[in-house]
């Protein structure tokens, strides 16, 4: 992600005052890495001025192209002893491989210096100049071998140019220039500077560079670089750029001494200087000032968001000078989109506050790690149902209660009918039977019955009835728990879908992104959106309602709503947040401070400091739990359970019908036997009225099942007693046994 942030232009003359002015201005910029690319300068004026400006310290990094090595290699040994101010500078030198030819030439050059024939040292450009002479000499020699002659012709373009004293018109042009150029491009020989060969673009194959480092007054080679291999500890092949077989695999350099004599790699940039601190835009809020605002009359900025930023700044491992600049007039909340745009336009270096991280903002600025979770929620009026003394009746509708009570009575009667003939627990005096009948039915809710069912039909009815009671009990418990723990909404709005479907006005906070989200993403008509600027306006609009100039609900971010609800008991949140997001600090694109602040925020979250800051600002009057509410708990009605009631009723009715059919069959059989064994005509067979038949039938049902069985077993006796006598005898013995 390295890039050149600024380019500082210098004239060819390198006037010292000009250099000082430009370097002074550059100190106010963020980058501290300087890449110096100028013509060879024996006076090294850039570094001399930088030393005067105290810019050769450990907070700066100086890189130089090969002009520096060309200059230093040309210095005589005596001058190289005064280069201590260059300590830590890293530069490049065109790589020239060692060879016997080069060593022999350097030996001859030393002798020429001793004889006075040469006065300067040789740099790589000197070696390349020497090779250039030989390249041209070889090319001309080959040209003469091939063409045997050199010819020239006058240049018509120069004929009309008459400059006094120069006689340019007499210059002639070499006729074999193109042929000589072709021979030059075919050059392939080894010179002092290494292998010389031209590529298809007519450039000499690069032999790479030596990476040099100024350490005191000495120049150290700390590694090599080429287009193919990158950084390396061994020299590349001078023609192709390939490394030899002894190259290190990890592609590192030797240790580098940086300005100030340090070996640690410098950071290479500062966020801001004390002379030009960071300009941090801060929203000057008019409402919910606990988050961030300017204190009137003191020009001091404080709030929850400011404390988070200051705490995170303490964990940043370098100095960050800054100034807070309020954004907004303080009479109404500013538009946060405009604040973010001013960061992108470099009016501000950063923005600190309750800034929601949304898509359109992340396209123009970089955000820190979120320091607070948020999302849009719906606020509506609520009513408290826990004050009612009859709240235990609310889980079921009146219809549900009536049907349930009726089934208790029906089950009680049916079980008594089914068990009366076979179960002694359901016999006895009428009062006792009535008490037993109803106690058996209602006590199935709470405990195991003392009385047990004996008949198969009674047990079948009880199995279905107990299953129905289990479902009813569980549903009742869940519904009552919900009613007792969740406040009921007095608004018909049950969620974002119902809010969109309605035509009622919707409130939103001035300056919030909620306006654009509701209109652009949820396609709610902007005419329905009502801007509200303070908690007082929230309360007033919600109390008035949509019919009296207020709003049906308010859509706002969760932290604002929590603060509002901590002071209001008549309103609550409907459902869950329907968007997920967070608050962060905005920075310019590619700002390194964004990453360091994000790391600091994560540390604050891990060590609990974020929670402590939250409690400091929002728990001064005691922490209030969030008033999160789901949809209004609805009463359970018969529609939800009609299938179970239908099943229980059908089984009960079927069991009763089977019982009655059995009783009718036994009654008919009983009467038939009675007529067969009666010695005198029975009045019931000839003149009994319908009421008498019913009376005798119920009287028959009231008899014990055991007595009937004995009666029918004795019907086959050859010397029967009158059937009434048999029945009375059996019944008397049963009563005596009881």
Image: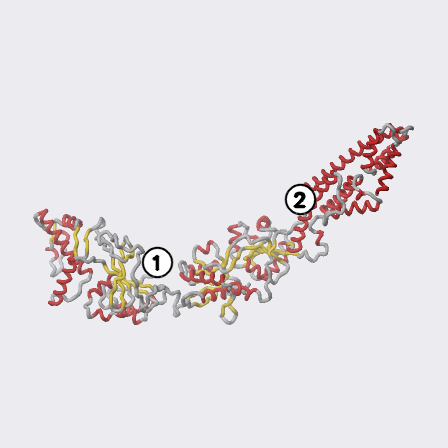
x and y percentages locating residue 411 in the rendered image: 75, 42
The residue lying toward the viewer, choosing from 506 and 695, is: 695
Per the image, the residue denoted by label 2 is 640
Eye-nearest disc, 2 or 1: 2
x and y percentages locating residue 205 in the rendered image: 22, 52
Q: Is residue 211 left or right of residue 379?
A: left
Q: Which residue in the rendered view is the most extreme toward the right?
A: 680
Q: Is residue 109 left or right of residue 627?
A: left
SS for dot 2: helix
x and y percentages locating residue 342 in the rendered image: 44, 60
Q: Which quarter shows the C terminus?
A: top right
The tag earlier along the polypeptide, 2 or 1, is: 1
x and y percentages locating residue 296 in the rendered image: 52, 70
Residue 372 badge? none
663 w.r.t. 478: above or below: above
Residue 2 badge? 1
Q: Residue at x 22, y 69 (%)?
A: 80
User: Does the rendering let one see residue 551?
Assistant: no
């Amino acid at each position: 992600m390295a890039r050149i942030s600024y380019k500082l232009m210098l004239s060819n003359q390198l006037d010292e005052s000009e250099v000082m002015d430009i370097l002074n201005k550059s100190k106010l910029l963020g980058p501290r890495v300087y890449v110096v690319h100028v013509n060879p300068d024996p006076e090294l004026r850039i570094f001399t001025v930088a030393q005067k400006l105290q810019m050769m310290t450990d907070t700066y990094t100086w890189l130089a192209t090969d002009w520096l090595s060309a200059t230093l290699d040309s210095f005589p040994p005596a001058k190289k002893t005064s280069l201590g101010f260059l300590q830590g500078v890293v530069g490049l030198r065109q790589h020239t491989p060692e060879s016997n030819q080069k060593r022999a030439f350097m030996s001859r050059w030393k002798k020429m210096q001793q004889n006075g024939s040469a006065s300067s040292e040789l740099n790589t450009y000197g070696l390349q100049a020497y090779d250039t002479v030989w390249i041209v000499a070889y090319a001309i020699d080959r040209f003469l071998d091939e063409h045997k002659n050199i010819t020239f012709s006058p240049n018509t373009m120069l004929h009309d140019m008459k400059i006094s004293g120069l006689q340019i018109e007499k210059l002639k042009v070499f006729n074999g220039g193109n042929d000589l150029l072709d021979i030059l491009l075919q050059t392939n020989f080894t010179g002092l500077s290494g292998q010389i060969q031209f590529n298809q673009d007519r450039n000499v194959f690069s032999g790479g560079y030596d990476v040099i480092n100024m350490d005191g007054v000495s120049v150290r080679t700390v590694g090599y670089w080429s287009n193919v291999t990158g950084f390396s500890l061994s020299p590349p092949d001078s023609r192709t750029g390939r490394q030899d077989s002894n190259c290190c695999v990890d592609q590192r350099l030797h240790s580098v001494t940086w300005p100030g004599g340090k070996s640690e790699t410098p950071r290479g940039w500062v966020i801001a200087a004390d002379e030009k601190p960071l300009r941090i835009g801060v929203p000057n809020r008019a409402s919910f000032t606990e988050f961030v605002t300017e204190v009137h009359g003191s020009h001091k900025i404080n709030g929850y968001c400011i404390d988070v930023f200051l705490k995170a700044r303490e964990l940043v491992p370098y100095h960050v000078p800054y100034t807070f600049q309020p954004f907004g007039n303080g009479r109404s909340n500013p538009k946060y989109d405009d604040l973010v745009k001013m960061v992108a336009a470099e009016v501000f270096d950063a923005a600190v506050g309750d800034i929601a991280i949304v898509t359109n903002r992340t396209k123009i600025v970089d955000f820190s790690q979120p320091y607070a979770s948020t999302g849009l929620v719906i606020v509506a009026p609520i009513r408290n149902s826990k004050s009612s003394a009859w709240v235990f009746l609310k889980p079921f509708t009146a219809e549900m209660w009536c049907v349930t009570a009726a089934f208790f009575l029906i089950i009680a009667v049916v079980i008594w009918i089914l068990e009366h003939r076979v179960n002694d627990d359901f016999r006895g005096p009428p009062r006792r039977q009535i008490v037993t009948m109803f106690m058996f039915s209602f006590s199935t809710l709470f405990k195991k019955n003392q009385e047990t069912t004996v008949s198969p039909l009674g047990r079948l009815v009880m199995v279905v009835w107990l299953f129905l009671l289990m479902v009813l009990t569980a549903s009742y418990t869940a519904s009552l728990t919900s009613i007792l723990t969740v406040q009921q909404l007095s608004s018909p709005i049950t969620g974002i879908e119902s809010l969109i479907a309605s035509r009622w006005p919707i409130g939103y906070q001035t300056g919030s992104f909620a306006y654009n989200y509701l209109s652009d993403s949820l396609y709610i008509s902007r005419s329905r959106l009502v801007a509200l600027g303070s908690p007082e306006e929230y309360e007033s609009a919600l109390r008035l309602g949509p019919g009296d100039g207020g709003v049906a609900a308010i859509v706002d971010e969760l932290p604002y709503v929590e603060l509002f609800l901590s002071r209001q008991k008549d309103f609550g949140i409907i459902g869950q947040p329907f968007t997920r997001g967070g608050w962060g600090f905005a920075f310019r694109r590619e700002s390194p401070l964004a990453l360091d602040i994000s790391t600091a925020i994560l540390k604050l979250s891990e060590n609990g400091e974020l929670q402590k800051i939250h409690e400091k600002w929002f728990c001064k009057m005691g922490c209030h739990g969030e008033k999160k509410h789901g949809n209004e708990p609805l009463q359970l009605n018969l529609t939800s359970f009609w299938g179970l009631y239908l099943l229980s009723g059908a089984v009960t009715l079927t069991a009763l019908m089977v019982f009655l059919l059995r009783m009718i069959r036994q009654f008919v059989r009983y009467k038939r036997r009675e007529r067969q064994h009666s010695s005198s005509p029975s009045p019931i067979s000839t003149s009994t009225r319908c009421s008498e038949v019913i009376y005798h039938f119920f009287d028959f049902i009231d008899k014990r099942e055991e007595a009937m069985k004995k009666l029918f077993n004795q019907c086959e006796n050859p010397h029967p007693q009158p059937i009434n006598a048999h029945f009375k005898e059996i019944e008397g013995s049963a009563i005596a046994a009881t």
